[in-house]
Amino acid sequence: MFFRQLYEPRLAQYSYVLGCQDTGEALVVDPLRDIEPYIRLAEQEGLRITHVTETHIHADFLSGARALAQATDADLLLSDEGGDDWQYAFPHRGLHEGNAFRVGNLRIDVLHMPGHTPEHLNFLITDASAGDLPGMILTGDFIFVGDVGRPDLLGLVEDEPGIDARMARCMFDSLQKFRALPDYLMVWPGHGAGSACGKALGALPATTVGYEKRVNWALRETDEEAFVVRLLTEQPKAPRYFRNMKLWNRRGEKSAGRIPAPRRLSIKELEALRAQGALLIDTRDKLAFAEGHIPGSVNIPNNELFTTWAGWVLQPAQPFALIAPESAIPELTIELFRIGLDHAAGYFTDVHYWVQAGHELAHLPQMDARELAAALAAREAVAIDVRDAHELRDGFIPGAISAPAGRLVRGSLQPETNRRLVFYCGRGDRSAIIASYLLHKGFDNVTSLQEGIHGWRAAGFQVEARGDANLPFAEISVEEALQRHVAQTWTLVDVREPDEFAQGHPAGAQNFPLDDFVEDEVIERLRDLEPLLLICNTGNRSAMAAEWLVEEGIGRLVSVAGGVVAWQLHHLPWEK
């Protein structure tokens, strides 16, 4: 039996080639859109690709299954277990629970394991030349090393209330089937650490059924309700390009196609593209970009973040060009091709040529930890944490506003504040991308924290954890505040000064300046308006207002964490 696991680090994706050396037949599982590596590998091993399949309809990359089957005249076998809504919309041989097919001496048994997606399959592999017992299982995005697939991606394309919880319950049922498998089976997953298809994937390339039963949190949880809550809680934000991948892969669109060869752009061509609204993607490292870049360009460094963030920032039909050295263009082009971004107008190799042509460079301001600490103490800056919610458990800069990076890319208003907006993440990579994107969108007071919260800790500054503050009132997020205001008719009270309120405020808010709380008449009016959502600029004055009102006997109130800065960054309803 021939077996090879192929790994794509920027997608943290595994695909597989299995073959029977006796008959020369081969099976490819979960191929990427660029199919040449599979064809070359088969040729090198003296095999011919006779079967192509995939575990499910992928959301994070374009599948090459259809194109590979056509190129090799192979049998295309795909799941028909997705119900009416999740059927592949192109010719294939359908697979169902209990089916089996052979590739030479290899027997592949089909298991339906819904949860990550409705149609999801696993493949149980038996090498008949070695015996009757299966030796491995290919689990796709069902079971990972130490984790399971997220159940919420279907919600990107299906507007059905409760669909996430329904898929989580399917996952729980599928895990019971997995528990019945023999412990010795090798488990080969569809993704490794770094994938957005789960919460906490392990870095090992494989595991066993028995090991996962012992250590995988999902297999150790026996209460279905607790499992559903935990699985749905704190999933990382799904990149917005996932929706397109899901739809294209279901319909078989963009499967084929040649990897493009973008052309080198002249200064005049680059100037013309900028004038036409093309987006420039600068792939240099964050420090080089900060020191000087072509105005309006967005920094997506050429590292393991590149593919995901290109998918976040670029729209499928949006014209764009790359700023990168010529040697990097082939690799970058393949990465973009894998997610359907195969329409680059060209590339430009060096921003210094831009300067030589008489143009100026723009700069992205940077702060180190000590500079930020001083600016926060002087109330000259607001720290904005762009990490996902689950990352905040490890601590965040005291007083920071949480605004996950994905939400900022989808749309945000520039906060009407004279404080500098200082974005940070773990080590400064995501925040540099976000800061550059917001500069491109017209934000004019953006700064990135060098080395992120890692640098903050290294400089000796303390971090805050959820629940650290011993407050006599609750703090809630701006999203929850909006929900309470709209659905539960809580009164939204803006405690800023009238001139601040007049410049702009959350829709439906009433203005009660904090300084007026000394008046009994104001306290009584607020008492009549309970329950209260108290909001200010960043959360400091609303916290003071909450303490004041609690002392006055008003208990049905909360303070809105992050204030109107967070409100605008999250693009919530705003009026003037």
Image: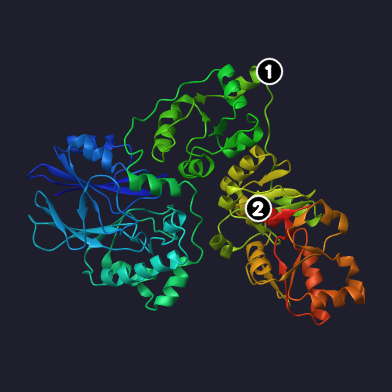
Amino acid marked by disc 2: His
Disc 2 secondary structure class: loop
Q: Is residue 323 visible?
A: no
Please give left or right for residue 549 compared with residue 100 in the image: right
Please give left or right for residue 157 compared with residue 190 in the image: right
**Disc on res. 358:** 1
Report, in whole angstroms, how far the alpha carbon at label 1 lies from the one at label 2: 38 Å
Q: Horizontal and vertical percent for residue 187?
A: 27, 60
Q: Write down the residue under mark 2.
A: 571
Q: Horizontal and vertical percent for residue 164?
A: 44, 64
Q: Nearer the viewer, residue 120 or 34?
A: 120
Please give left or right for residue 571 compared with residue 44 in the image: right
Amino acid marked by disc 1: Gly
Q: Nearer the viewer, residue 71 or 176?
A: 71
Q: Nearer the viewer, residue 116 or 403?
A: 116
Q: Residue furthest bottom?
A: 553
> Mark 1 or mark 2: which comes first in sequence?
1
